[in-house]
């Protein structure tokens, strides 16, 4: 089976009030980034009467070129077989033509992948929505001999199909029957607009058909073009359905909006009124969102907003945060791509703040150790000002440490301190191996373990003073002089 589109003349089953728009041909292929297997120009299907033009991200060939790069390319959001190669079956063709279309079910790309494609960004994940129920999907997949994995999402409508070593998450359209701010009891539907209504932000509520038709019920595409982040419907209601949406709002603000401070007043009011609801959200979910906020744009503005709206105490951040230090470090790390914890550590006054954050958010051991390291060493481990070798204190610290990832932490500390030049120098520096071992000292006639340890430390200090230049013979001759 080749990589053919669904026929452009095939009738679509749109619900009353459904907004269906089309896109024109993109004049400049450079407007959309490419990756291996990605078409360089975008396809414009036959316009239908009454259909308004709209930019989508479908290529000149089938939509599979967006979703599935050529085999062995190593790029793109999905792996797969080369499109149109004889004897090879394409995942999307299989899903569409042999399964969903055959059984008269609709299948569309959903949510974040649509947003990213329209925004000219490669989607990290591609999720699908369908009118088929989980039971109908299971029957279709079983009949086709397609493996299904991870049945935990089935009660919420999600079936994960395994095709060509890739997972495809397909979720039945649904509405929320009851919500408690963390979880929702759902009911399946065939109404695409009802499903869109339950989504968080307008830019995440769109669907994209495989013929290039965009289904946009809440002006998400207009908001995306205008770089506006808005909740679907009433912000207060959307937040109370899932309080994590407060942090998702901040996260997408840092990804979509050009400048800080461009918020709707009612949105900020709804966040402030419902911030305490985040206290009931698991730390792991909060940390996922907070890390994305810390690595996006407008971090300085958003962290201050988190404190101004009284969100901070409910997500593990210290009440008495050192915001002056945060302001300084925010400028220091510009352009250096710091780890999330590197910037976050500037809010902490003492190491106990890191420990309390860990208790709330369940951060990784690596992240916790980085935070503890920065808080402990940010004032004492600094560049040498009385030497022609300003990097030497950091190098000596690494040489003396027994921690395998200490060089990474030191580089993060240099980012924290805004030492751009020293950071570049450190990244190019290779840690030299200490040339003397305990066996060398034993061969020199010293057998006492305590004495060997003391001598090794003395030799290490001599080696450091030489700028790590002294070789084994020279160091061992030093033993003879001291003994």
Image (cartoon, rainbow, N blue to C red):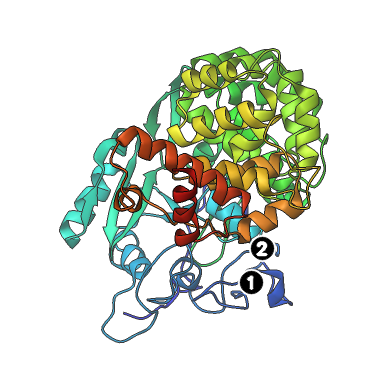
Name which residue lies at 47% across and 40% down.
457
Where is residue 98 drawn, in percent x and y?
A: 28, 67
Q: Is residue 463 visible?
A: yes
Which quadrant would the C terminus be assigned to in this image?
A: top left
Q: Secondary structure at mark 2?
A: loop
Which quadrant would the N terminus be assigned to in this image?
A: bottom left
Q: Secondary structure at mark 1?
A: loop
Which residue position holds label 1?
47
Tell me: 442 left or right of 142. Answer: right
Where is residue 69 drawn, in percent x and y?
A: 45, 72
Which residue position holds label 2?
51
204 vs 99, nearest the viewer? 204
Q: Residues within 10 Å of mark 2 (few under 14, many from 20)?
A: few
264 vs 16, nearest the viewer? 264
Vertical position of residue 288 compared to residue 246: above or below: below
Tell me: 407 left or right of 22. Answer: left
């Amino acid at each position: 089976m080749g990589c053919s589109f669904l026929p452009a003349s095939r009738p679509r089953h749109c619900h009353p009030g459904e907004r269906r728009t089309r896109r024109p041909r993109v004049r400049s292929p450079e407007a959309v980034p490419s990756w291996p297997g990605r078409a360089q120009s975008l396809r414009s299907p036959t316009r239908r009467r009454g259909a308004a033009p709209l930019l989508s991200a479908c290529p000149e060939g089938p939509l599979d070129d967006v979703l599935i790069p050529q085999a062995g390319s190593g790029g793109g959001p999905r792996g797969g077989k080369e499109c149109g190669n004889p004897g090879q079956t394409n995942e999307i063709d299989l899903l569409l033509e042999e399964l969903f279309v055959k059984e008269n079910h609709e299948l569309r790309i959903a949510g974040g992948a649509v947003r990213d494609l329209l925004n000219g960004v490669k989607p990290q994940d591609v999720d699908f929505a369908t009118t088929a129920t989980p039971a109908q999907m299971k029957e279709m997949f079983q009949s086709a001999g397609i493996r299904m994995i991870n049945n935990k999402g089935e009660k919420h409508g999600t079936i994960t199909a395994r095709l060509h070593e890739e997972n495809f998450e397909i979720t039945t359209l649904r509405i929320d029957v009851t919500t408690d701010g963390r979880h929702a009891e759902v009911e399946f539907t065939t109404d695409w607009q009802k499903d869109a209504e339950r989504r968080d932000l307008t830019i995440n509520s769109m669907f994209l058909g495989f013929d290039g038709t965009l289904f946009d019920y809440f002006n998400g595409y207009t908001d995306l073009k205008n770089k506006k982040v808005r909740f679907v419907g009433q912000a207060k209601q959307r937040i109370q359905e899932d309080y994590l949406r407060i942090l998702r709002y901040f996260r997408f603000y840092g990804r979509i909006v050009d400048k800080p401070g461009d918020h709707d007043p009612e949105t900020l009011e709804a966040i402030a009124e419902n911030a305490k609801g985040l206290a009931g959200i698991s730390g792991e979910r909060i940390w996922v969102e907070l890390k994305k906020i810390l690595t996006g744009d407008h971090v300085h503005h958003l962290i201050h907003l988190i404190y101004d709206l009284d969100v901070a105490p409910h997500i593990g951040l210290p009440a008495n945060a050192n915001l002056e230090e945060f302001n300084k470090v925010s400028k220091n790390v510009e352009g250096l791509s710091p780890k999330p914890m590197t910037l976050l550590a500037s809010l902490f006054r003492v190491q106990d703040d890191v420990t309390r954050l860990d208790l709330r958010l369940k951060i990784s051991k690596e992240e916790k150790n980085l935070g503890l390291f920065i808080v402990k060493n940010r004032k004492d481990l600094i560049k040498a000002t009385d030497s022609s070798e300003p990097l030497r204190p950091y190098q000596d610290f690494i040489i003396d440490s027994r921690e395998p990832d200490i060089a990474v932490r030191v580089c993060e500390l240099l980012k924290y301190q805004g030492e751009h030049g020293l950071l570049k120098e450190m990244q190019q520096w290779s840690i030299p191996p200490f040339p003397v071992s305990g066996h060398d000292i034993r061969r020199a006639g010293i057998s006492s373990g305590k004495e060997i340890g003391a001598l090794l430390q003395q030799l290490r200090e001599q080696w450091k003073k030489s700028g790590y230049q002294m070789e084994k013979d020279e160091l061992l001759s030093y033993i003879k002089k001291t003994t």
